[in-house]
Amino acid sequence: MSAPDAVPLDTDVRWIHGSPSPRHLVDPPLQVHHLAPGTVLVRQSKDLTYEAPFILLLLGEDRALLLDTGAVDGSELRSTVDRLVADHTATRTGDTAYEVVVAHTHGHGDHVAGDAAFSGRPRTTVVGHDLDAVRGFFGITDWPSEVVALDLGGRTAEVFGIPGHHPASIAVHDALTGLLHTGDTVYPGRIYVEDPAALLDTLDRLVAFAEQRGVRHVLGCHVEMTRRPGRDYPLGSRYQPDEPSPFMTVAQLRAARDAFRTVAHRPGIHRFDDVVFCVGEGPRVLVPLQARALVEQLRWRLGLLRRRPDA
């Protein structure tokens, strides 16, 4: 099944990517980009957090779905979402109050740190990020394979479980735009594998779903690769001027699935063109990651990173 009538996304954007020195921080706290009407992607600045996560907002006629609240205090994100919702509903004529659902791609700290800023917001539901809370809110009875629909009014988000990186990870498909959001499960960067068997199953289901639904774009929450195949920025990088797009293709998703099949049972760091699989949490993974991170942090603090001409 294809999606020939999907609303096209504007993915040709230069994202904020940090500053070459802590003595001269240049990025705003957030970059807000309208991918399409009612579809907004936000990135938190590397000047605030090296994680620099992407946060997706889908605005329907009756409610909005915010996926993640980022890695820092959520006050700036809350005011941004309030403004985006107000702009979206300015000409709305519906009889019911507009709702916001704050859900999470998964429960790691760099995706839930801003939750408190939304906890008292009127007509807002902040979904818990443990497995029981996720299953309960979305009504998923057959985890992780069941695909459920969340009606936003005029657009439907399809949600299903994708464990492997985190037990309660979810994928969200927006049929209106052909966008498949996979959180930290597939993105151009280091994919940390907690449960290899679960991730094998997850990647098979993601590929099958993407092919069946005619997915046009695969999105994750981070960018950690450079534009050189197989080369990632060190853990903790605060300046990434040579980033690829956060949007991947179904072909890249399929290639990641095929690559992981070859290394799933081998603890360690495995580099491929578009992704790096970090299987397990032992010294084969932690020692090289932390060693590179220490060197990178020192170079950044000393101002030894050089700005590229196109940065």
Image (cartoon, rainbow, N blue to C red):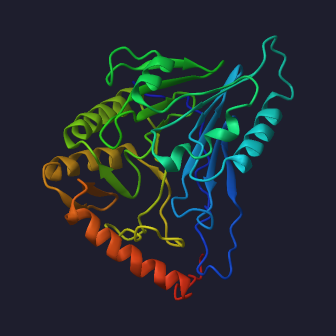
Q: Position of residue 58 (x, y in %)?
A: 63, 33
Q: Residue at point 26% right, 40% down? A: 199
Specify the quadrant of the image occupied by residue 152.
top right
Question: Of residues 247 and 189, which is closer to you in this image?
Answer: 189
Q: Residue at point 28% right, 38% down? A: 203
Q: Is residue 83 above or below residue 48?
A: above
Question: Of residues 223 and 300, which is closer to you in this image?
Answer: 300
Q: Is residue 285 above or below residue 82?
A: below
Q: Is residue 202 above or below residue 22?
A: above
Question: Of residues 94 and 228, which is closer to you in this image?
Answer: 94
Q: Residue at point 42% right, 68% down? A: 227
Specify the quadrant of the image occupied by residue 94.
top right
Q: Position of residue 289 (x, y in %)?
A: 32, 68
Q: Is residue 257 above or below residue 171?
A: below
Question: Of residues 109 and 153, which is closer to you in this image?
Answer: 109
On screen, residue 202 versus residue 138, left or right, reads left
Q: Position of residue 141 (x, y in %)?
A: 37, 14
On screen, residue 2 versus residue 157, left or right, reads left
